[in-house]
Amino acid sequence: MTDASRASDIRIVDFAPQWRDDFARLNLEWLERWFAVEPIDREVLGDPETHLLAGGGQILFAIDRDGRAVGTVALKYEGDGVYELTKMAVDGAQRGGGIGRLLMRGVLDKFRALRGRELFLESSTRLAPALKLYESVGFRHYPAPRPGSHYARADVYMIWHPPE
């Protein structure tokens, strides 16, 4: 299957309880591969309803034609119109097929629909393909770490600037 046909078979959906375990699975896979899973990760992944959704955040999933969750991304509401783009993950076997870009489009559409004022993310220089994706949609680098960062692994701090 080509990358283009793979991405064309994907639909982006909002959180539903049936995808809860997939949110943790997809994120733990990349965290365990590249980093150590930090306490904040375990808290959020163990109870996304409390840590993301109840506070005004959103979780999206990329679902393949067989009904499997193959990617996810979240918006964590920080208050005053500020959101963090967080917990973006694509199944290891599916990376490079355009699913991350579909998730990014979906989450940016969601941010605009929420009428957010600022969207930021924290990442790592170890995740070069993700950084290229973020840059390609308008995220710009700022000095890291972000004030109040929760992540020891974060050496990248970016804020989204909508393309003009």
Image: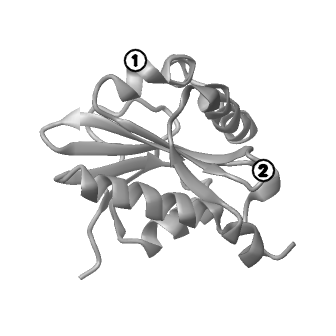
**Can you give x and y, in whole percent of width and height, for residue 80 in the image?**
12, 39
Q: Are marks 1 and 2 in contact (CB under 8 Å)?
A: no
**Can you give x and y, in whole percent of width and height, for residue 61 in the image?**
57, 46
Q: CA distance from mark 1 to mark 2?
A: 27 Å
Tell me if I can see residue 97 in this picture: no
Mark 1, secondary structure of its residue: helix
Q: Dot 1: within a 10 Å radius of its alpha carbon, few (fewer than 14), some, or many (20 or more) residues?
A: few
- The quarter in which the C terminus is drawn is bottom left
Q: Is residue 87 left or right of residue 75?
A: right
- Observer-nearest of 156 and 44: 44
- The residue that label 1 is drawn on is 50
**Can you give x and y, in whole percent of width and height, for residue 88 in the image?**
54, 47
Tell me if I can see residue 54 in this picture: yes
Q: Dot 2: within a 10 Å radius of its alpha carbon, few (fewer than 14), some, or many (20 or more) residues?
A: few
Residue 137's place in the image compared with 88, above or below, is: below
**Residue that appears at 63% across and 36% down:** 27
The amino acid on which the numbered mark 2 sits, given as a three-letter code, is Gly
Q: Quadrant of residue 143?
A: bottom left
Using the image, tell me which numbered label, if any, was put on residue 81. Answer: none
**Residue that appears at 53% across and 57% down:** 103
**Residue that appears at 74% across and 48% down:** 91
- The residue that label 2 is drawn on is 92
Residue 20's place in the image compared with 63, above or below, is: above
